[in-house]
Structure formats: structure tokens, C-alpha cells
Amino acid sequence: MCSAIDYFSVICYLLIFLLSNCSSIPLNQLSEHQFHPDVGLNISQLLKRHGYPFEGHTVVTEDGYILALHRVPHGINNKSEEVDKPVALLVHGLMSQSIDFLNNEPEHSLGFLLAEKGYDVWLINLRGNTHSRRHISLDPDTDKDKFWDFSWHDSGIYDLPATIDYILSHTGQSQLYYFGHSRGTTAFFVMASSLPEYNQKIKLMTALAPVVFMQNNIDPSKRLMADFLAGLKVTAKVLDIHELMPHSDSILTIVKTCCYEGSVCVKECEMYFEQSFGHAPTEFNMTLLPVYLSNTPAGFSVKDGFHYLQHFKNGGRFRQYDYGSSMNKVKYGQSIPPEYNLTNVVTPVALHYARKDKATGYKDVEHLAKILPNCIRLSLVPLEDFDHVNFIWSNHIKTLVYDEVFEDLKKY
Ligand SMILES: *[C@@H]1O[C@H](CO)[C@@H](O)[C@H](O)[C@H]1NC(C)=O
Ligand SMILES: *[C@@H]1O[C@H](CO)[C@@H](O)[C@H](O)[C@H]1NC(C)=O
Ligand SMILES: *[C@@H]1O[C@H](CO)[C@@H](O)[C@H](O)[C@H]1NC(C)=O
Ligand SMILES: *[C@@H]1O[C@H](CO)[C@@H](O)[C@H](O)[C@H]1NC(C)=O
């Protein structure tokens, strides 16, 4: 049963627990539990339920990936459809997807807040996730090794430029506001350093929990994985694993069984959530948890993960994928992968980070701020326990972070 989802996933842990311990759950009681009305809804259904418009668009990248681009053209209180609306592009992190900027409470969801402020909101789905698991000639299941041979480097080089050009041409705008969370920031820095002309297309880059350098990551389990990277690579190759944590309907079943106050396996649910995403106990909202987990995780490539893990022990560099010295010579003409030149990133950048973020070390973010030529803000979240995923999912995110974001938007 676990192999149907994926080997590395902690979800297996929940499944095993369910199979062995939860057989005694009285199912009639389960069905009586009143879940939040957003549980199980996808992005178009969720927007409809909240009274918002939804548009689906498709972008094909230069290397053939077919990306689903989602749009919320206006708010419900602010229905302004003037032609000159400012455009916002929201770019999600690892395992994530477009809906994750909309499934917190509406008054604390960046997507809804921007729509009400009069922005034309576009939400990307990077290659490989639930909505963008498509290619013009490759099949993600039968051409696994070719389809999944990408990391956030390719999202930065192909997905973002294709998407930005599509949006600007569709709206007639010359610039847009970029909002990235986690990998959505990594891919941005790849693009803005490798294709410098794209800096002119971005008015302001708001980076939530930016991930660039990994030298000072504080999470012992990630550090351990980085130590055993060579072994993980061999394991993935032998087991023919290329995709991690794809969306699966069994996740929602598990979530509905375990993830509510009073369920017999609520502790395992919390543990899964904390292990997979990092989530401050003080910011943990059990009511919304099944909403978040209805669509997420949404899948990513093994290479995405490996490319990050390579950065734990590379002397604090930000550089392209390391294939090993002889293969690097073939690919790059040098034995060490080329570094991304962050001096090229002239777009104004605002950095928001947290002290205990397990996915990105605060010292690494502070280092990034020193290197970027046009860093306009370096803001530490004033809540001790705040973690990576709280930048999109938290009960107090508007006052803790987004109000500062909106201040910056007024200036640029
Ligand atoms: C959401 O689900 C409905 C019903 O299955 C489907 O018709 C719709 O296309 C889905 N929306 C997206 C954006 O996938
Ligand atoms: C509504 O949107 C317009 C244009 O998009 C914007 O100028 C205006 O400030 C917005 N109104 C509010 C109350 O935010
Ligand atoms: C958790 O989310 C629910 C649903 O949006 C909300 O009613 C409740 O107030 C939230 N709890 C906390 C502690 O903020
Ligand atoms: C990085 O870019 C800057 C400005 O664009 C340039 O002056 C510098 O030579 C580049 N550095 C490297 C190592 O290519």
C-alpha cells in the first residue's frame, strides 16, 4: 500500500498506524464529525465557495512542460476590473501548489488579501506538481527518468520566464509583483541571476522564508540526509524513485480519519504535519489542518530535494546541480558546478524570515541580505516558534508578516 504513494513519505507511517491501530474506529462516529467546509475542495471549488472568480490558463515551457496557471482576476469586495490593475504572481514552495496561498482563513491568505487590495492575482504551479504533471511528449509515469530529470534550477530557467512572459503579454503590463515562498524564492534567484533581463519585469520581489544558502540549516534530520546524500542517490536509483510525495486521495481519507480534535490518531497527524512541513505548536490550527492537507503535499522531484541537500556541505555556495566532477566537466566544462551570480539580482527584494525555520537557516538568510545588491528589507518574524510553513499557514500571519508586505507594495 505504501509503494502506491511513495517510499520516503511519512504518510506511510500514518497508513501503517491506521491499518494496525485504527480498525476499531467506529465509522458512524467518523462520518458525524463536522469538518470545515473547505475540506476536500480544489482551488476552483474553494474560490467558488468563497464567492471569488477563477480562471485556468496553460503555459508551455521551452523544454515542453505544460504548466497550469491559476488566476483570481478580482476580489469580492473590490470588483475593480480596470485594465491597468497591478499584477501579482504567487510562487509556491516544495510539495506545494497554487491553492496554498488561498486555504488559510481568507483574512490571513495572501491570495485573497491581494485580490481585495485590487491586484490581479496569478498563482503558478511549478513543473511536477498535481496540476503541472504534464509534458508535450514525456509521460510522468512511463518516462519517469526523463520527465523527472529537473530541479528548481529548471523551474527558474524555464517555468518562471515562460509564466512571467505569458502573464505580461496577457495583461498588457510591463512589470509584475513577485511573491515567493520557500522554493518559489530559490527559483526566483536562479532566474534573476541567470537571465538578468527578467529583473526589469519585476517591480518588487517579496521573499517569504527565502532558501538560497544551506550551510546554517538548523534541522538535524535534514543535515543527516545531507550526510548520507550519496547513499540516498543510490537508493533512489535502485528503487527507480523519481517523484516524491505526490498528491493521493488516500491522504484525504487519512486526514479525515486522523486530523481532527478528538480522533484516536490525532497525535500522529500532528507529528506528520510537523515533520513534513515544520509547524509551530502555537500556530497550529487543528480545524484548518484537514483543509491544508486536502491538496498538499502535491509532489516534487527527487532531484529538487538532492539539489537542496548538496548545498548543506558546499562551503556556503549557491550553485547549479552537482553531477560529480567528471559529469560536471561534460555538462558545464568544469569539475565544480557554476555558481549563480547573485550580483545580477538588481530587482528590489524584501526578505521575511524566522529564527527557528527548519527549512532555511536564519544565518543563511542574513548572509543573503548582505550579498543582494538591492535588498530593501530584512524582517525577522517577531514570534519565537514561527516555522517555515507558517509563512502561508498561520492564524496571525497578516499582522506578523503581510502588513509589512503591503507597506512595501505601496512604495514600489
Ligand atoms: C476541481 O474539481 C472539479 C470536480 O472534480 C473539476 O471539475 C475541476 O476541473 C477541478 N479544478 C481544477 C482547477 O483542477
Ligand atoms: C480596489 O482596487 C483598485 C484597483 O485595482 C485599487 O486602486 C483600490 O485601492 C482597491 N481598493 C481597496 C479598498 O483596496
Ligand atoms: C482556526 O480556524 C478556524 C476556521 O477558520 C477559526 O474559526 C478559528 O478561530 C481558528 N483558531 C484559532 C486559534 O485561531
Ligand atoms: C557577477 O555579475 C556582476 C554584475 O553583473 C559582474 O560584475 C561580475 O563580474 C560577475 N561575477 C562573476 C564571477 O561572473
Image (tube, rainbow, N blue to C red):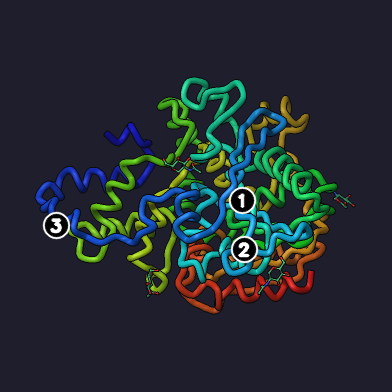
Question: Does the Cβ of the disc 3 residue fall within 8 Å of ligand 3?
Answer: no
Q: Position of residue 56 (x, y in %)?
A: 59, 43
Which residue in the protein does label 2 denote? 115
Q: Position of residue 55 (x, y in %)?
A: 59, 47
User: How packed is label 1: few (under 14 Cα within 10 Å), some, or many (20 or more)?
Assistant: many
Question: Does the Cβ of the disc 2 residue fall within 8 Å of ligand 2?
Answer: no
**Residue 370 visible in the picture:** yes
| Image position of 202 with respect to 241: above or below | below
User: How packed is label 3: few (under 14 Cα within 10 Å), some, or many (20 or more)?
Assistant: few
Return the disc, 2 or 3, that comes first in the chain's sequence. 3
Q: Which label was assigned to residue 71?
A: 1
**Residue 344 visible in the picture:** no
Name the mark nearer the viewer: 1 or 3.
1
Residue drawn at (44%, 57%) of the image: 49
Front-lying residue, 279 or 213: 279
Q: Amino acid at mark 3?
A: Gln
Q: Are marks 2 and 3 in contact (CB under 8 Å)?
A: no
| Image position of 41 with respect to 153: above or below | below
Q: Secondary structure at mark 2?
A: helix
Residue drawn at (62%, 63%) of the image: 115
Q: Work out how far the residue at label 1 is from the one at label 3, CA to CA, in angstroms.
A: 39 Å
Q: Amino acid at mark 1?
A: Arg
If the image is split into quadrants, where does the N terminus sit?
A: top left
Return the disc, 1 or 3, that comes first in the chain's sequence. 3
User: How packed is label 2: few (under 14 Cα within 10 Å), some, or many (20 or more)?
Assistant: many
Residue drawn at (45%, 39%) of the image: 244
If the image is split into quadrants, where does the C terminus sit?
A: bottom right
Which residue in the protein does label 3 denote? 29
Q: Secondary structure at mark 1?
A: strand
| Image position of 292 with respect to 129: above or below | below
